[in-house]
Amino acid sequence: MPQIFHRAFNTLSLVSIYGSVFLLAGLGLAAALYARSGYVTNAGLAREQPIPFSHQHHVNELGIDCRYCHTSVETAGFAGIPPTKTCMNCHTQIWQGSEMLAAVRESYRTDESIPWQRIHKLGDYCYFNHSIHVAKGIGCVTCHGRVDQMPLIWQEKSLLMEWCLDCHRQPEKYVRPRDQIFNMTYERRDPDEGKRLVEEYQIKSKMSCNACHR
């Protein structure tokens, strides 16, 4: 019986099969990279705010502690956005006539909240408690980055589940002494400190789904 297809079709078939496999793998890799990129996670995106508040100026240059504005970070599940009164504690004395701060003065006068754009936002299906992380020795920088170097605040980390799990699997890599929680420039010098603090603070690596999804 004569051969229907030319022998070249054997090579063409192999190339097509292997090419399809590599194409699908490449598409899968591209999709995974895209899902982790700032286009999807908003990491690195500085949103325009109604007032150009600079953490770099207030934290780094003026030395204001995080807790002065975010008063509930140690005691509640949320860090809290400061009321306008907190801003006016200083700005009734300094820059009180600045046009840039007109919205602050108007908010204080009318008792209307400033419409800040939220930067760090988890899904509604995800439970996160600030106070327990602070109590267990997780510093602000670990999640929020060096806010003392941000003229406008942006989301430093991806906030993806894999990012959370990395810390939950290896808390010794991230834990720090409680008196250094709000220190933006803290650097670990003792390589065994992490394991010691995990034991001292009784940190349990909760890996079950209902630890975060409630």
Image: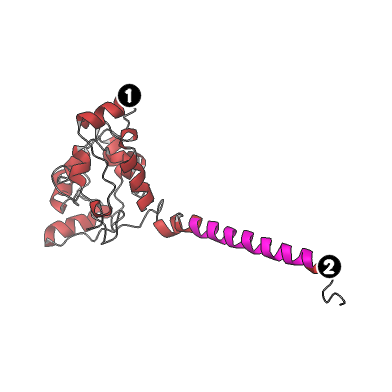
Question: What amino acid is at disc 1?
Answer: Asp
Precedes in sequence: disc 1 or disc 2: 2
- In contact (CB < 8 Å): disc 1 and disc 2: no
Furthest residue in direction right, as rendered: 2
Q: Kindly identify which residue carries mark 2.
A: 7
Q: Residue at x 40, y 56 (%)?
A: 41
Q: Secondary structure at mark 2?
A: loop
Q: To which quarter of the image does residue 203 belong?
A: top left
- Asked if residue 188 is positioned above or below residue 23 in the image, the reply reads above
Please check the rendered image and state whether residue 17 is part of the magenta-colored stretch, yes or no.
yes
Q: CA distance from mark 1 to mark 2?
A: 65 Å
Q: Which mark is residue 192?
A: 1
Frontmost residue, 147 versus 205: 205
* Residue 5 against residue 130 in the figure, above or below: below
Q: Amino acid at mark 2?
A: Arg
On the image, the x and y values in percent for residue 85 come to: 13, 50
Q: Secondary structure at mark 1?
A: loop
Magenta-colored segment: predominant secondary structure: helix
The residue nearer to you, when weighing 90 against 37, is 37
In the rendered structure, the answer to whether residue 156 lies left or right of residue 129 reads right
Q: Residue 37 in the image: state x and y as whole percent.
A: 46, 55
Quadrant showing the C terminus: bottom left
Relative image position of residue 14 (x, y in whole percent) = 72, 63
Chain part drawn in magenta: 10-32
Q: Residues within 10 Å of mark 2 (few under 14, many from 20)?
A: few
Q: Is residue 151 visible?
A: no
Residue at image location 59% in from the left, 62% down from the top? 24
